């Protein structure tokens, strides 16, 4: 699996390269700035891009904007964004096109190698990997909205895990209940939120996130 990596801090960039290579990824390019990232994505056409939000020369959202431009040029290009802090605006922009293969993680998650690598693989496969803190803030922001108020505490818990990209089986194991129980909770969630039920995990996660971030 070929990866384009963009991180301006040399030590972190080098560490990520070594980590990903240790897990069998091939680093197609490791760059430190927005212009380099744009060029690498166009030339390398990687299986997944792992991108720091803030890159030179602007040090604002340069990395995110380069990644979004690349997704417009190559629809569905898998992108995993890394950020120092939770920025809801960045999460909204990343999810705006409604297609899969997106992720948003806090940089702290990088220190859990297995969790980070799992997120890279999930995004590369067209899935979603959203940081639990991002999901928590989106849920809290919509907490007073009527459709959200219809959910039970357990349904909110299930939806938060769904939004992280977890399958029904994984959620059942996490909550120590049967997969059938999770399927029932999932069905209830979509009915209460007025969203179509789908067997496609990625589609359902994106639908829920799009709803939560709407308005």
Image (cartoon, rainbow, N blue to C red):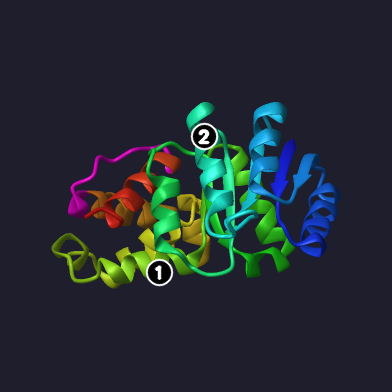
**Residue 71 in picture, x, y percent from top left:** 51, 34
Q: Which residue is mark 1?
A: 136
Location of the N terminus (image quadrant)? top right
**Number of marks in the rendered image:** 2
Q: Which mark is residue 71?
A: 2
Q: Is residue 154 above or below residue 204?
A: below
**Residue 22 in picture, x, y percent from top left:** 85, 51
Do the residues under discs 2 and 1 have CB atoms within 8 angstroms? no
- Specify start and end residues of the magenta stretch as a single range: 191-201
Residue 202 shows up from this direction: yes
Residue in view at x 64 percent, y 70 percent = 108
Quick one: 85 or 55, which is closer to the camera? 55
Residue in view at x 41 percent, y 46 percent = 95
Residue in view at x 69 percent, y 49 percent = 33
Mark 2 neighbour density, 10 Å: few (under 14) some (14–19) many (20 or more):
some
Location of the C terminus (image quadrant)? bottom left
Determine which quarter of the picture holds residue 7: bottom right
């Amino acid at each position: 699996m070929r990866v384009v990596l963009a991180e301006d801090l040399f030590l972190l960039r080098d560490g990520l390269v070594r980590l990903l290579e240790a897990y069998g990824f091939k680093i197609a390019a490791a760059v430190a700035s927005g212009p380099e990232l744009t060029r690498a994505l166009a030339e390398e056409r990687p299986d997944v891009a792992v991108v720091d939000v803030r890159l030179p020369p602007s040090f604002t959202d340069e990395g995110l904007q380069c990644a979004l431009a690349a997704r417009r040029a190559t629809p569905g290009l898998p992108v995993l964004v890394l950020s120092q802090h939770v920025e809801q605006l960045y999460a909204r922009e990343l999810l705006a096109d409604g297609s899969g293969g997106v992720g948003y993680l806090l940089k702290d998650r990088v220190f859990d190698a297995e969790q980070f690598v799992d997120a890279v693989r999930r995004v590369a496969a067209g899935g979603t990997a959203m940081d639990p803190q991002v999901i928590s803030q989106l849920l809290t922001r919509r907490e007073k909205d009527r459709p959200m108020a219809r959910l039970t505490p357990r349904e909110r818990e299930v939806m938060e895990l769904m939004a992280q990209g977890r399958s029904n089986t994984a959620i059942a194991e996490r909550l120590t209940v049967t997969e059938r129980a999770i399927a029932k909770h999932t069905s209830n969630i979509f009915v209460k939120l007025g969203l179509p039920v789908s067997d496609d995990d990625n589609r359902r996660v994106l639908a829920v996130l799009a709803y939560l971030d709407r308005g």
